[in-house]
Image (spheres, coloured by chain):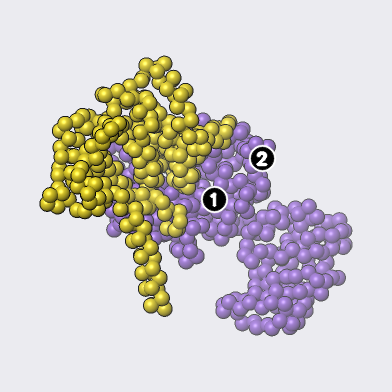
């Protein structure tokens, strides 16, 4: 158990800057998720915390100990990889105990820890099997077990669920959450999947091009995204962005006032989440239905607005539309997000 | 459908069997004739060693009236030591080339592999000079050094290709588990590429065991002769002791055969690895 602190981290490969002046403090026992599109530097950052990549500049501390000059094994971390990275020639027991055996820990203690981990993860039945005889979910559990037995201060996860199929991913996501509730360790988790980020994280770090865009709890990010990038990244389906105008402290879309805003007159981007739109006879968003997707309990309406902008709305399953139907939607003023031309959130 | 399948399967087998017979025929001829007297060999080359034809004189002169066991030991020593060196050094060099980035890595890789294109026999004169200067003429060490150099390029080439396919995450995971780079190599990487080791072993072993050139030039002394060189003593300028030559060759096949059988299961996996996912 420990805090993790990153100070002024820089990383460049040749002339390419991958991480730029990144600082972050992770609290003891916190589950923090790095999320961002591929190439944003999130995996590199995790590998730097693990000690698998060197820092170009900056400092990493775990607890009150500076660790960025230490080899991975002495940092008090354990890492779970996307491809599981099990040793194919060792059985489950061998995989779980390998690190401990190398650390010169007594056999009794190894057995105790391995049995404990296998019990937590439900692996007791398959201790003598080789990785190739395990399913994807079981392999991932062994990989997590290998991290648990080391009793690290900080757990690092590098997209651990990306290789699993959809159903198993949901299942393992819940298992990881349970594991965190049980162990209460500091965990750092990298993913490109915003649903994993939203469901697992105590705090989410949104990264773009090696920079932190926003740090906050999932709800903060959802409710108050600092810019259009975070707003578009968090939430599914993604937020709609519409060109609108500010006139006399009112945000107008095609002459209809959507919400109020104390700002200079001029063009702005109006951010509208699909789930906040409701069907309303006199709603300001009027258009014809281009695509209608029905999922049973809910449905998605893709609307072509009069000024050729498009809009997606998530509605109750009770509505049925056909392509070409006219539809008008409304939104409560407090659910509107307004962004300036640079993409910054200027909602009041 | 089934019939065409069976027909094509039969066709493939017919071709393979025909080829096997063609390849095995000279071998069978050697083994059969090694059990015959010289007269019988020339009277009836393809006849089986039965009745009057049978004679174990060839084996008798090879095993009891010559230094053949010594030559055999020399060959085994040279082949095994060279093989160990080729596998160890080749795998280590390939690991370094595939795992670490360092200045000039691709140039060094190219340099190491260049030897595939240059036959080592072209350098015989220089090699002989070098060996004599080193005082290693007429030693097995000379042969071992030359064979190691001869085997390394192709070994490094094959190993590099396969070691690149070893998942980087497994090595990283071993690093986090606290293994040193050497232990990662020996305890994680090597077990993963066992089939390739068998492949390289077989490819390297056969030319060494069969070589006549370097033993003749570098170590022709009585004490350091290898099997292939030793057999030459039965081939005189005017008379050839065919029974003994064939018997010696038959015996010389055995160790290669044994090693091949040991490696073959792994070898087949090595050759087909990567062809099929899984």
* Image quadrant where one finds the N terminus of chain B: bottom left
Image mark count: 2
**In-front residue for pair B52/A176:** B52
- The tag earlier along the polypeptide, 2 or 1, is 2
What is the chain letter for disc 2? A
* Drawn side of residue B224 relative to residue A167, left or right: left
Looking at the rendered structure, whether the residues under marks 2 and 1 are on a common chain is answered as yes
* Chain ID for yellow: B
User: Which residue is labeled 1 in the image?
Assistant: A190
Disc sitting over residue A17 in the figure:
2
Where is residue B248? Give x, y as percent. 24, 38
* Drawn side of residue A311 relative to residue B125, left or right: right
What is the chain letter for disc 1? A
Q: Quadrant of residue B252?
A: top left
Q: Residue at x 43, y 49 (%)?
A: A85
Q: Are marks 2 and 1 in contact (CB under 8 Å)?
A: no
Q: Residue at x 44, y 42 (%)?
A: B159
**In-front residue for pair B106/B4:** B4
Q: Colour of chain A?
A: purple
Query: Does A110 sit above or below residue B229?
Result: below
Foreground tag (2 vs 1): 2
Determine whether the residue tagged by mark 2 lies in a helix, strand or loop.
Answer: strand
């Amino acid at each position: 158990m420990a805090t993790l602190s990153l100070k002024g981290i820089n990383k460049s490969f040749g002339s390419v800057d991958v991480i730029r002046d990144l600082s972050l403090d992770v609290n003891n026992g916190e589950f923090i998720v790095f999320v961002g599109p591929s190439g944003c530097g999130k995996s590199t950052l995790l590998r730097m915390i693990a000690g698998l990549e060197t820092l170009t500049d900056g400092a990493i501390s775990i607890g009150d100990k500076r660790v960025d000059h230490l080899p991975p094994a002495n940092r008090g971390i354990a890492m779970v990889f996307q491809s599981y990275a099990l040793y194919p020639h060792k059985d489950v027991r061998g995989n779980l105990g390998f690190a401990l055996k190398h650390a010169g820990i007594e056999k009794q203690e190894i057995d105790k820890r391995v049995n404990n981990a296998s019990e937590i993860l439900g692996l007791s039945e398959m201790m003598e099997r080789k990785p190739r005889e395990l399913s994807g979910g079981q392999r991932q559990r062994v990989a997590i077990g290998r991290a648990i037995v080391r009793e690290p201060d900080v757990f690092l996860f590098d997209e651990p669920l990306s290789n699993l199929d959809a159903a198993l991913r949901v299942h393992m996501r819940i298992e990881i959450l349970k594991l965190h509730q049980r162990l209460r360790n500091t965990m750092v988790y990298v993913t490109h999947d915003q649903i994993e980020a939203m469901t697992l994280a105590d705090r989410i770090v949104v990264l773009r091009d090696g920079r932190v865009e926003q740090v906050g709890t999932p709800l903060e990010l959802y409710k108050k995204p600092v810019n259009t990038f975070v707003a578009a990244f968090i939430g599914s389906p993604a937020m709609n962005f519409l060109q609108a105008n500010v006139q006399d402290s009112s945000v107008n879309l095609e002459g209809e006032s959507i919400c109020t805003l104390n700002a200079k007159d001029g063009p702005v981007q109006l951010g509208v989440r699909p789930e906040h739109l409701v069907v309303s006879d006199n709603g300001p968003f009027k258009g014809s239905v281009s695509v209608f997707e029905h999922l049973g309990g809910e449905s998605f309406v893709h609307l072509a607005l009069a000024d050729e902008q498009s809009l997606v709305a998530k509605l109750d399953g009770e509505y049925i539309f056909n392509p070409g139907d006219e539809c008008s939607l409304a939104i409560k003023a407090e659910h509107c997000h307004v962004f300036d031309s640079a993409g910054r959130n200027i909602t009041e | 459908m089934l019939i065409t399948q069976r027909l094509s399967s039969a066709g493939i087998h017919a071709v393979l069997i025909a080829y096997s017979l063609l390849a095995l025929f000279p071998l069978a001829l050697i083994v059969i004739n090694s059990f015959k007297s010289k007269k019988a060999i020339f009277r009836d080359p393809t006849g089986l060693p039965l009745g009057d034809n049978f004679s174990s004189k060839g084996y008798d002169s090879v095993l009891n009236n010559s230094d053949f066991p010594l030559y055999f030991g020399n060959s085994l020593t040279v082949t095994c030591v060279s093989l160990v060196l080729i596998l160890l050094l080749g795998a280590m060099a390939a690991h370094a080339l595939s795992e670490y980035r360092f200045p000039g890595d691709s140039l060094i890789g190219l340099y190491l592999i260049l030897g595939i294109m240059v036959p080592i026999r072209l350098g015989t004169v220089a090699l002989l000079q070098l060996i004599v200067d080193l005082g290693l003429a007429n030693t097995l060490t000379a042969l071992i050094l030359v064979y190691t150099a001869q085997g390394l390029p192709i070994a490094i080439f094959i190993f590099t290709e396969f070691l690149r396919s070893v998942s980087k995450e497994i090595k990283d995971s071993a690093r986090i588990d606290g293994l040193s780079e050497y232990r990662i190599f020996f305890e994680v990487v090597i077990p993963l590429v066992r089939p390739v080791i068998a492949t390289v072993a077989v490819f390297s072993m056969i030319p060494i065991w069969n070589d006549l050139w370097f033993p003749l030039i570098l170590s022709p002394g009585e004490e350091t002769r290898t099997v292939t060189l030793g057999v030459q003593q039965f081939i005189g300028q005017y008379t050839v002791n065919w029974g003994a030559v064939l018997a010696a060759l038959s015996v010389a096949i055995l160790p290669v055969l044994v090693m091949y059988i040991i490696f073959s299961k792994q070898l087949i996996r090595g050759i087909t690895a990567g062809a099929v996912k899984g």
